[in-house]
Amino acid sequence: WAKRFWNAWVLYMPVQNEADVRMFPLDAIFVDEVETLKPELADALQERLYHSSLKWERWFSQPTVAGYGINERFAMTDQRYLQFKCSSCKQWFVLEENFPKVLMATIEGKPVLWGNDWDATLWDRRWQFQYCCPFCQSLIPDPRSLKKEWVAKFPDRDAHGYHLTQLYSSTMTATEVAQLWHQAQFSLRRKERFFNSVLGLPYSGGERQPITPDKCFYGTHEPTGILFEGNKRYAGMDVGDTNHLVVLEQMPDGRLFVTWAEEIKGKDKWEIALRRLIDLKVCAIAVNAMPYKDSAKKLIRSLPPEIKGALVYDTAGKGISITNEDEKLNAPILAISVQRVELMDGTVDAVLNGTIVLPKRGLPQTESIVKHLMNYIVEYTEKGRDYAKGREDHYGRAIDYARIVAENAVPLRLTPSGYLTYENAFGRPIGVVLTEANW
């Protein structure tokens, strides 16, 4: 229900879809547990404030992974952290940014082991922990007794963001925090949860977020489309209101270099994509079939003979199947149905082992690709292991589709049969690779 007060509309209701959001114009939104809210619903909520002169926004949540949810919103604020001043050396510090250096093991109140030198896999029942200054190692019985102030990393930004942590909570002692950190050493899941729920920080990498910037391989090239004329180039396109096109150029050693990445918008986005494929001399493209199957088919049928095309269906079942659609119309189109998890797993493997090489760091296209690949977030549901849906991962999905045609160009007859593929270059496939038998 909605309540009118202070001449403002505030909405109180569980939000399930965009239709729920669009029922009311709003002057203020208070969103709890942002991590559990679909990104498109968060954006839709924000849009309901556009008419208002008040435009109050309050977003609350525990983070999960970097670059998503509350961490993404916090990154756009002035990023305020609570700083403490050591009463001994007068240095200012942030507890969570200096963990575990802010821990000191004591026995009968005397320091015995500084957190920076502590092997956290070891535990002595005699230890009691206290916080300490990360600079002079002076013991701090209670951080809240120190002089403190909120300090913004980016003071020129209008939006305020506050980072909170359990390290200065009144309900958790330093010993309890240390014991949780000790337990976290034996389980990646526990370590992720410790970062999220105790330090209040996203956890980069691990099981939930396999791709992070430091794990990717980068070339020295810019995404200009063509590195060497003699190489084969394969394209993938993730379609939607904005189409995301990626081109992979296959090197003689089997590596796939990202040589083009582009967002294509507007009414003529399909025509632009067709021209781009021709200009970049692509030999094959795979396009996800949904949600614009008719437009995807029209693009494939418009390709010149030297460019082959395929539709890709993400399926929930196991394995892979190849069919020809529209054979009765005498206009068959190659359709590849592949398990979504398996397809995305293959790209994760290829990115992490250097089979896929991104353009050089610092370029807008490279940063966008990395951001989208970081949104390959693993989820475990009652149906099993999957990748989170609804996240901004379009360049990653475009790479999925380009990779599957690049790795299977020979059995799919998308390139001359003698051409080198990853399988015949290295002797084993990455991700989903077809064989002559199932083709």
Image: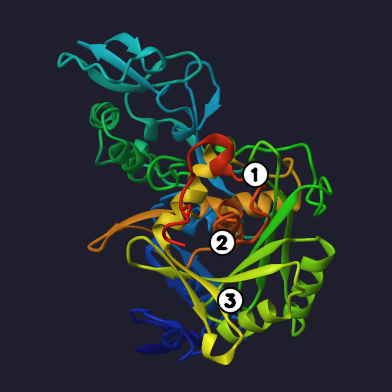
Does any portion of residue 432 appear in the rendered image? Answer: yes
**Closer to viewer: mark 3 or mark 2:** 2
- Residue type, mark 1 in image: Leu
In the orientation shown, which residue stands out farthest toward the left? 125
Residue pictured at 27% horizontal, 34% vertical:
187
Cβ–Cβ under 8 Å for marks 2 and 1: no
* Marking on residue 55: 3
**Residue occupied by mark 1:** 420
Disc 3 and disc 2: Cα gap in Å?
54 Å
Residue 232 or 44: which is nearer the viewer? 232
* Marking on residue 72: none
Closer to the N terminus: mark 3 or mark 2? 3
Does any portion of residue 161 appear in the rendered image? Answer: no
Q: Position of residue 352 (x, y in %)?
A: 53, 39
Left or right of 202 in this view: 197: left
Residue 93 or 347: which is nearer the viewer? 347
**Residue occupied by mark 2:** 412
How dense is the environment of label 3, judged by Cα within 10 Å: few (below 14), some, or many (20 and up)?
some
How dense is the environment of label 1, judged by Cα within 10 Å: few (below 14), some, or many (20 and up)?
many
User: Does 271 sit above or below residue 198?
Assistant: below
Query: Is label 1 in a helix, a strand or a loop?
Result: loop
